[in-house]
Image (spheres, rainbow, N blue to C red):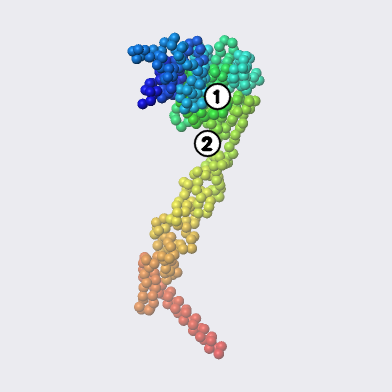
Amino acid sequence: MDEANSYHVVIASDKVRRIFDSLKIRSWTASPIKYVYEIQDEPKYVGYITMDRLPKFKTITGEFKFEAERLHRYGYKAKPGKFLKKYDPKLSDEIISTFSTKYGVDPNKSQLKDFYITTDVEHGYHEDNYKWDRSLGGTLWSSCMREDRYNSLMGFYVKIGVQLLVLDQGDGICGRALLWEGLKVKGSGLTINFMDRIYTIDVNDEELFKLWAEKHNYWYKKHQSWNFKQMFMSPTHEVHAPLTMTYGVPELDSGSSYPYLDTMSYYIVEQGILSNSPETDNETRWEFTGTDGSYDLIEVPKVYSEYLGRSIVESDAVWSERYDSSLLLEDSVKDIHDDWIPKENTITLLNGELAEVNDPVIGLSKRLGGYIMIDAPDVTFSEADDDWVLLNDTIEDFFGHWILEENSIKLYIKEYDCTITLHKNELKSSNIMKAVTQKLANEQEIKDKQLYLTSKEESND
């Protein structure tokens, strides 16, 4: 076994251990770093001992003692990012950056004593109340809603019950973030509290807000920007994306002005909710992404359905000639005439095609066991059988009616030397005599015609 792998890493710094836990950085046995500590007089650096220096701390009894004098003499120091790269070169740039930011937080600030929550969003947003410093890389002074002309719009947050988390260290506001409580996470049944985009004067203070959120069980944005609206960190520092969150609000006035919203930017009119996702069930939405108090109205074209008795989304509709109405596509099918009909009024024919239940060109065939198209050239109706049947299965009876061949009977009348075909259910004496009389009359008519033609030929001669 490699000697370096025989020693576990000792994290003697509570600060490093806490950050490692929050970022889920493992205690890596194979790391060349074996001991991590804080340098009291240089808080911006991380102190550490590598494997090659461990013998300097080993006593004659074989124990290790990391005394301050020896740490000062034989220990290494590095800025947080450089330290972490040496600790584990496989860690991502994002993890290294987050560790550096977290480590750079002033220990006194980490007590979170300078935060307060307020409903006075106007005060927290107005630039006159900010600390005057634009040199520390934060976003507070670039906020589009900080100016006096937009301050009256902040009453919107009071109306919908959203508060503001403010960081003020005594010389003016140096950070703020909106606090949303009771957001619903779509598809999960989860209800959460959410800290919106963080605006600070000192970019390092963003970490303070995240620490506050984790301590008070608030979710927060993974990236502090106007986009990435569906990527979040849980209070236990787990990434969740994409998440769709909703927040119920009172009915909003279409004639009013509204602030720019970083995350919960979409108002779904029909549901009366704000959402961080523009995806809707084809519903009208307002988008609060303007910086002048206006909003974008995204209306979904609709048509009225006489059949349904209500309006439906145009892109979800189809036209039915039979019903003279628009129908919902998802609830409709094409019939044998290539027309849209409601699924609920549909019959499946024996050939697999679909038809409307009251379509006059379909009929039930008891013999075939299903519905067929009765205007097909190979289909006829047998009155004697009271059924729609295939023409190939029938013959004509004496009276010219189509009957099923299997139900037909041929009768030879010896007295009159004639044969007639009748349906087996019509073998009444009256029907038989009627058929015989008709047949004899037909034969006599033929004889008369032949006699007439013969006489006519003779007269012409």
Instruction: Look at the image and tell me in which quarter the N terminus lies.
Output: top left
What number of labels is visible?
A: 2
Q: Position of residue 218 (x, y in %)?
A: 48, 21
Q: Position of residue 320 (x, y in %)?
A: 54, 48
Question: Pointer 2: what residue?
Answer: 281
Q: Secondary structure at mark 1?
A: loop
Q: Which amino acid type is marked by label 2? A: Asp
Question: Pointer 1: what residue?
Answer: 224
Q: Which amino acid type is marked by label 1? A: Gln
Disc on res. 22: none
Give the class, few, some or many, for how many residues have Cα within 10 Å of label 1's Cα (few <14, many ≥20): some
Q: Which residue does the image show at 49% across and 81% down from the upper left?
A: 449
Question: 241 above or below 131?
Answer: below
Q: Position of residue 140 (x, y in %)?
A: 60, 19
Taking the image as shown, residue 359 lies to the left or right of residue 145, namely: left
Taking the image as shown, residue 290 lies to the left or right of residue 206, namely: right
Q: Which residue does the image show at 61% across and 31% down from the upper left?
A: 296
Q: Which residue does the image show at 57% across and 25% down from the upper left?
A: 225
Question: 299 above or below 449?
Answer: above
Give the class, few, some or many, for how many residues have Cα within 10 Å of label 2's Cα (few <14, many ≥20): few
Q: Secondary structure at mark 2?
A: loop
Residue 50's image quarter? top left
Q: Is residue 307 visible?
A: no
Q: Which residue does the image show at 45% across and 52% down from the upper left?
A: 348
The residue nearer to you, when weighing 374 against 46, is: 46
Q: Is residue 271 visible?
A: yes
The residue nearer to you, when weighing 318 against 36, is: 36
Kindly give the residue lying farthest to the bottom in the view shown.
Answer: 461
The disc, 2 or 1, on the residue closer to the chain's N-terminal end is 1
The residue nearer to you, when weighing 123 against 175, is: 175
